Image: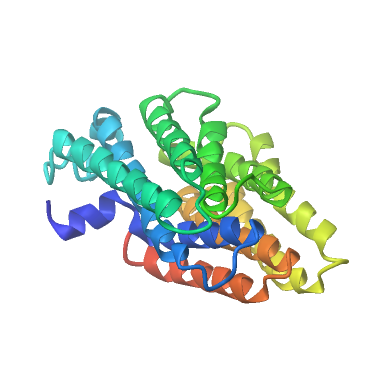
Amino acid sequence: MKLSVALKLGRVSNLPTVWSNVLTGMALAGTATTDCRLLLLIVSLSLFYVGGMFLNDAFDHGFDAKVRPERPIPSGQVSAAQVHASGFGMMAVALALLGWVGFGYEPFTQWRPVAAGLALAAAIVFYNWHHKNNPLSPLVMGICRMLVYVTAALAVAAALPQQVAIAAVVLLCYLIGLTYAAKKEHLGRLENSWPLAFLAVPVIYGIYLAPAQPAVLLPLALLAAWALYALRLLRRRNPGDVPRAVISLIAGISLLDAILLSGAGHILFACLAVAAFVITLALQRWITGT
């Protein structure tokens, strides 16, 4: 498999949003910014993401042959079997890294990150196997991203903090709106608009956090403006507008992380999350994010 094909299959331009998710899960669980487990978790959860993207193409290769024949499998650049094996292999390595985190570092969280990782792997496989014509697929995709927070938090904490649980619900709502738009990407249009209302939940939560933490206001304003830009594209629906809106909303995940981090007083991590947003946008210019 050529590197260029692997990068396209893995949608690696979106990886900075995974990294900011890991930062958020760990920080809200109370870990120090210098925790040595951070790098291992970033690598592990990046492998979950890239492996899941590989499986997305592997499971969808029949659909892509009709609708997106330029994708790597239908265009003959790689076989479906090879992509399947690579995707499952990456997730196996990701689980092994979570075992290392849980049993190799004090305070030992033991099986907790592995259990969360198994739940994440199951959600990823289920989504990829049964997301076409499944009205609940936006919810399943949202659960996948929620479990990134949960896995990162349980890698450093003995129990899931309430703050992480609330953040996971906020992220879930955003992903429901995002994934609904992504499901309609190949159509270039949206039949219904009401699922997009879920995109407003992080903004509402940011407004709730702002009086106690004024630092929330900057990422909150950025996310609100960015979401309005994406919604304008979805409403206009010129050729290419829906895919452009989808990748814009994906990049916005890191702005959501910045809101949550600044709301919890983690200003440095919030700045890193905003940087992840900028890096994602830059990478999306070179490697497609969908």
The residue lying toward the viewer, choosing from 64 and 254, is 254
Tell me: residue 165, above or below residue 228.
above
Which x, y percent locates residue 221? 72, 68
Tell me where residue 232 sits by quadrant: bottom right
Regarding residue 14, the answer to whether it shows in the image is no
Asked whether the viewer can see residue 84, the reply is yes
- Please report the residue visible at 54 percent of the width from the left and 62 percent of the height from the top: 23
Q: Nearer the viewer, residue 2 or 67?
A: 2
Q: Residue furthest right?
A: 211
Quarter of the image where one finds residue 68: top left
Q: How is the image coloured?
A: rainbow
Image quarter for residue 28?
bottom right
Place of residue 132 in the rendered image (x, y in percent of width and height, measured from the top left): 42, 26
Instruction: Report the residue at 74% width, 55% height from top.
Output: 203
Q: Position of residue 27 (x, y in %)?
A: 61, 62
**Residue 67 x/y as whole percent:** 30, 35
For the point 17% across and 35% down, which residue is it? 80
Determine whether, in the image, residue 205 is placed left or right of residue 176.
right
* Front in this rendered view, residue 283 or 41: 41
Residue 128 position (above or below residue 207): above
Position of 213 compared to 145: left or right?
A: right
